[in-house]
Amino acid sequence: MHDPGETTPLALGVDVGGTFTDLALAGPDGVRVAKVPSTPDDQATGILDGVARLELDVADLERFVHGTTVATNTVLERDGARTVLVTTAGFRDLLAIGRQDRPDLYDLAAARPAPVVPSALVVEAEERIAADGRILTALRDAEVARVVDAVAALEPDAIAVSLLFGFLDDRHERRLAEALAALERPVSVASRLLPVMREVERTSTVALNAYVAPRMDRYLGSLTARLADAGLRPSVEVMRSGGGTFTTEVAAREPVHTLLSGPAAGAWGAAALGAAAGQADLLAIDVGGTSTDVTLISGGRPATSVDGTIDGLPFAVKTTDIHTIGAGGGSIAWRDDGGALRVGPRSAGAVPGPACYDRGGTRPTVTDANLVLGRLDAEVRLGGAMRMAPERAHDAVGGLAETLGMGVTETAAGIIRVTDAQMVKAVRVVSVERGHDPRRFALVPFGGAGPLHQAALAAQLGCARVLVPPHPGVLSALGLLAAPVTVDRARSLVRPLEALDDDELASAWAVLTDDADAALREQGAEVAGRRRSADLRYRGQAFELEVAGDDEGAGRAGATVSGATLAERFHAAHRERYGYDQPGEAIEVVTVRCRVEGPSPTLPLPRLRGGGDIEHATIGTREVVAELTGTDTVSARVVDRSALGAGARLTGPAVVVGLDATVWIAAWQTGEVDDHGILVLEGAP
């Protein structure tokens, strides 16, 4: 059913998740995908297993793009480098004290996560820069030498340098970094990595970067060496948390930009999918094996943020604004002390995995529950290779059912109801709680389990349209191939907007743009687009809103907006987010930002020919528990998705089976396959 169309460079996207490693190969013959178990001890092994599954000679590749969880897992597992932090005298305990906000307002015993650099590994430097940039205490040569000796005595694997108000004047940070380079350890410097205000977030970011840098460098070095030995010619690109990619050389130096690498690929892939379907406003929900990631996409671009956290630790680089919950296909269902049914956040992971994988798992999971309900087909091999064992799923769910005093089917339905409720709550966090009505958005469910839950989510959220990708289980891997090489730059100003004339604003952006342009070209890409913005707030507020700083329709060269236009946009953004604005209040410009992008590849979606109607694609029927409030079954059509051509229409109830994911279509939904293979579902219960 596929039409190769125009000649396409052979490109491979690889997304490593907690349970599976997904691969998407795009080329002249269309798209081929593979899903193999992840190998947590060495992610490269899983990647090469997937390459072998695709029967791919990497020497033929013209592009290799990677979404990795190395930085994420390093922080979560707390097995990063022994890192020494150099900071201003008197601020040894900055990371331990943090913002003094409580993790839980009413929990007097709430534990705060330990920083990645304990106070014992902090070296204080006698120097001081004032809030206005004046040098209060100069950094002397003798002090530099003392700091270097003190750091060396702590035997670090990595070093972070973050001085008070170093973003206003970086001379002291640069002097220390140059001297510390003699220790032949990687040195992360705040004024290079993140020259913005807020000492806690800036210092935490540079400490996290140093903490994960050695492991990321080893991993990327090993991966690129093994791929090079296999014949790979192009450089490996790594997905950034905020969208876009960068080279392995930059990724190894600035790994903090990869803390949400994998989830970001899915969000930006969903945005590209929406563009292909003519839908700019989307709710993207990625249901993987371990977690569910939710992103709001407005105007064709995912929301971004500079207020990220990982395991309770703040970091302030630009990231895709993703809300994550511990509910996925591998999430374990259990009975709490009060006798209630709970799901997650514990997961069966890649090893042993859900009970139905027959790899040693015995605890009931969401995947097991879907299999018991008939929504998953036991005859389908996951990823084309892994056969499921329905009897294992039945036994696992049955064991939980006994403890709950319920039937097996009733328990399985309860597991799915609880999971659906958690997912709906997550979507509301990024939509309703931020002033967006989910009813005006289309839902994009993906990940291995997303399409199984789409009907319940659409019904409860009021989404009348659902876009199911042609390869939902590997959309993150496909999204990698649609990502351009990208550079982000930012610098804090902290000035009243009325005190900045338009030329000063334009000059501040121009400095960032020139630096970003040069960094992009160093990675072998030419500038194809620029996006400038500014973080603004009313005087007296503690936090900011990011506002676009480009003149709409100005083209690639781009003109920046005036201060008056910036103010208008800020008032409107404040109204949208908080329901009110204050036009009479003074506005402060806190930070100016710039993103420069190389050429954006097209999302490699298949081009389908017509034909392959629903009757041709039907491979049978199966009894499925459709209404989760009971145990009655309905006869559902089972459809082979690969046999559906463009224009094929179907109605629920139906189970649409694919290589990488299964779609459950409720009785109230109708669907049609478009020219790109996107299954467009519509209807309301």
Image (cartoon, rainbow, N blue to C red):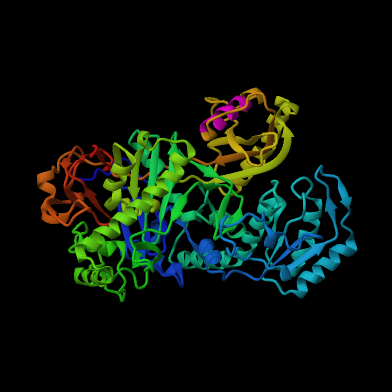
Q: Residue at x 42, y 52 (%)?
A: 293
The verdict on residue 448 being magenta is no
Residue 57 position within the rendered picture, expressed as x and y whole percent measured from the top left: 36, 62
Q: Nearer the viewer, residue 61 or 204?
A: 204
Q: Quadrant of the C terminus?
A: top left
Q: For the magenta stretch, what is the residue range?
A: 566-576
Q: Nearer the viewer, residue 618 or 607?
A: 618
* Left or right of residue 187: residue 371: left
Residue 625 position within the rendered picture, expressed as x and y whole percent measured from the top left: 18, 55
Residue 585's place in the image compared with 191, above or below, is above
Instruction: Name the chief secondary structure element in magenta.
Output: helix
Residue 671's place in the image compared with 17, above or below, is above
Q: Quadrant of the N terminus?
A: top left
Residue 29 position within the rendered picture, expressed as x and y whole percent measured from the top left: 29, 49
* Left or right of residue 29: residue 114: right
Residue 547's place in the image compared with 199, above or below, is above
User: In which image quadrant can residue 34 be found?
Assistant: bottom left
Q: Residue at x 85, y 45 (%)?
A: 134
Residue 242 seen by the camera? yes
User: In which image quadrant can residue 48 be found?
Assistant: bottom left
User: In which image quadrant can residue 5 be found?
Assistant: top left
Residue 474's place in the image compared with 576, above or below, is below
Q: How many marks?
A: 0
Residue 218 position within the rendered picture, expressed as x and y whole percent measured from the top left: 56, 68
The verdict on residue 572 being magenta is yes
* Left or right of residue 597: residue 463: left
Q: Residue at x 19, y 71 (%)?
A: 391
Q: Nearer the viewer, residue 130 or 219?
A: 130
Residue 11 seen by the camera? no
